[in-house]
Amino acid sequence: ARSRISCNVKQIVEGRREGSKGNSTGDFLDILISNSSLCDEERVSLVLDLLLGGYETTSMLMAMAAYFLGHSPSALEQLK
């Protein structure tokens, strides 16, 4: 089931990337697409993790915050 959902999300990401040239809505998916340090598989994984997080919402949020802060030294400095 995850692979079928993953395939659908990947198609959405690709469609959004092709269709949003200069027409960004500014939502979470646009932010993921604009992050050039992530590959499509990472983008899809993040979307699926958020969708299927269920009861682990707080731990997921903390893990994502740590992940993105680790990839953005300037954001980490601002947070400190």
Image (cartoon, rainbow, N blue to C red):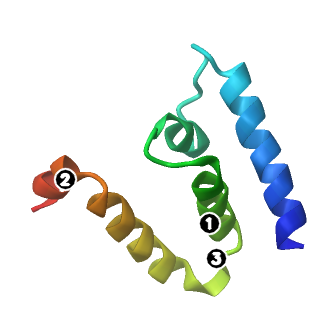
Could you tell me residue 73's position as x and y percent?
19, 53
As measured in the structure, the alpha-carbon distance from the residue carrying label 1 to the one carrying label 3 is 5 Å
Whether residue 43 sits left or right of residue 6 in the image: it is: left
The reply to whether the C-beta atoms of the residues labelled 1 and 3 are less than 8 Å apart is yes
Residue at label 2? 73
Mark 2 and mark 3: Cα distance apart in space: 27 Å
**Residue that badge 1 annotates:** 50
Quickly name the residue at label 3: 53
Q: Residue at x 47, y 80 (%)?
A: 58
What's under tag 1, amino acid-wise?
Leu
Q: Secondary structure at mark 2?
A: helix
Q: Quadrant of residue 28?
A: top right
* Quadrant where the image shows the N terminus: bottom right
> Can you tell which of label 2 and label 3 is closer to the viewer?
2
Give coordinates of residue 27: x percent, y percent.
56, 39
User: Mark 2 is on which residue type?
Assistant: Pro
**Mark 1 Cα shell of 10 Å, populated few (<14), some (14-19), many (≥20):** some
- The correct choice, above or below, for 31 with respect to 42 in the image is above
Q: Residue at x 13, y 52 (%)?
A: 78
Distance from disc 1 to disc 2, alpha carbons, whole Å, reads 24 Å
Q: Quarter-wise, where is residue 41 in the image?
A: bottom right
In the image, taking residue 33 as reference, residue 63 lies left or right, namely left
Give the number of the mark in front: 1 or 2. 2
Q: Secondary structure at mark 3?
A: loop
